[in-house]
Image: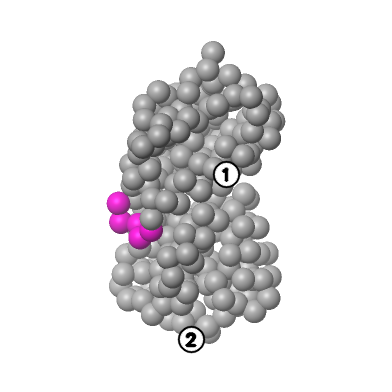
Amino acid sequence: MSKILIIDDEEDLVALLKDSLESRGHVVSVAYDGDNGLKMAHEQPDLIILDIMMPGMNGYELCRRIRDAVHCPILFLSAKRSETDKIRGLALGGDDYIVKPFGLRELLARIDAHLRREKRAAFLNQSLQRVWIRSGKMAIDLRARQMKIDGHLIPLTKKEFDIVELLSLHAGQVFSREQIYEKVWGYDAEGDAATVTEHVKNIRAKISARDPDTEYISTVWGIGYRFNKII
């Protein structure tokens, strides 16, 4: 059983999703606009289904405002179908992007896949013998899923931390954008490896604000990215 929050102004669609998810044993909360969705998101659901075009605050803005505080998967569900829209949603911290109209069975399968992935990640994090990774002024707490520079907490989104975790656990190894996308987003995700570039750019900007003189993540031109172990 998982706690799922649906934020969408289409009442008939919301009712269908709510009934389908509750029949599978989930606890479902509903918000019909971004403002109420913002309040309910801070109750820390296990997964959020988020529309983009809503009255008041749109889904993009809502995702941006909650991502640093909410670490569960966010699935965009939208009639906006251009590649630019999808990349924007993923770059803001979305974990998946599903275009309306959609197949209900496929959506339920994607929800199940994201929930399973979260449970596996939680189990692995709890069982990690290695808790801290240190490099220069950086300290990464794998269990708390936090990164600090010189003692200052760096606010990372879920996907940003997943990328940092992947690279730092394999310091010195070069990962292509496609490899990072597959390992962090999953093989069944619909998206573009180009979103990895945006996430790495955001990570670097946040790190640079505290330690502008150290290159923790290097670009290996034509290949991908590498985490640097700094003494």
Instruction: Please check the rendered image and state whether residue 45 is part of the magenta-colored stretch, yes or no.
Output: no
- Where does the image place residue 57, in percent across and percent down from the top left? 66, 71
Residue indicated by mark 1: 202
Q: Nearer the viewer, residue 7 or 230?
A: 230
Outermost residue toward the top in this view: 231
Which numbered disc, 2 or 1, marks the residue that appears first in the sequence? 2
Q: Residue at x 36, y 69 (%)?
A: 107
Q: Amino acid at mark 1?
A: Asn
Please rate how many residues cluster around mark 2, counting C-alpha atoms within 10 Å: few if below 14, some from 14 to 19, many from 20.
few
Please rate how many residues cluster around mark 1, counting C-alpha atoms within 10 Å: few if below 14, some from 14 to 19, many from 20.
some
Q: Describe residue 178's horizontal placement relative to residue 133 as left or right.
A: left
| Quadrant of the frame with the C terminus | top right
Outermost residue toward the front in this view: 221
Q: Amino acid at mark 2?
A: Asp
Nearer mark to the viewer, of 2 and 1: 1
Q: Describe residue 90's horizontal placement relative to residue 152 as left or right.
A: left
Q: Which residues are magenta?
A: 187-191
Q: Secondary structure at mark 2?
A: helix
Q: Which of the numbered marks, if any, corresponds to residue 181?
A: none
Residue indicated by mark 2: 12
Q: Residue 131, can we see it?
A: yes
Q: How is the image coloured?
A: one colour
| Quadrant of the frame with the N terminus | bottom left
